[in-house]
Amino acid sequence: MTIFARIVALIGLILIVGAAVFLAKTVIDINQLHAVANANRSTIFFNPVYNVLWTAGIALLGGLLAGTGLGLMMRRRTAVLKT
């Protein structure tokens, strides 16, 4: 296992955890937005769609990096035949 593979896997896992935290925050924001929208319809609301898109992108990148790092760690050298 190389250092590069471990670093890539670690960055991927950190991005996945960060995306999960960001997604939880976005869900809370959407719930608050929904409550405000039902209570007072005359105000301008924050649109959380962009946060959801960022979260999906971060999760995708994190999954890609984590999978790449784990795949690099699992790669083994091929056997060399002695002649």
Image (cartoon, rainbow, N blue to C red):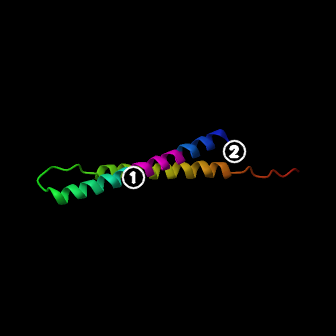
Image depth: mark 1 or mark 2 in front: 1
Q: Main secondary structure of the magenta part?
A: helix
Q: Secondary structure at mark 2?
A: loop
The quarter of the picture where residue 6 lies is top right
Q: Looking at the picture, which amino acid does disc 1 mark?
A: Leu
Q: Earlier in the sequence, mark 1 or mark 2?
A: 2
Q: Is residue 45 left or right of residue 72?
A: left
Q: Which residue is mark 2?
A: 1
Q: Callout 2, which amino acid?
A: Met
Residue 67 lies in the magenta-colored region: no
Q: Which mark is residue 23?
A: 1
Image coords of residue 14 (percent x, y) = 51, 45
In front: 6, or 34? 34
| Local SS, label 1 | helix
Lateral position of residue 34 relative to residue 53, left or right? left
10 Å crowding of disc 1: few (<14), some (14-19), many (20+): some
Which quarter of the rendered picture does the N terminus lie within? top right
What number is the disc on residue 69? none
Range shown magenta: 12-24
Q: Residue at x 67, y 52 (%)?
A: 74
To which quarter of the image does residue 41 belong? bottom left
Residue at image x 19%, y 57%? 37
Q: Decide if residue 62 is on the left or right side of residue 49.
A: right
Mark 2 burial class by Cα count in 10 Å: few <14, some 14-19, many 20+: few
Inspect the magenta stretch and tell me whether residue 18 lies in it.
yes
Taking the spot 72% from the left edge, 51% from the top edge, the residue there is: 76
Q: CA distance from mark 1 to mark 2?
A: 32 Å
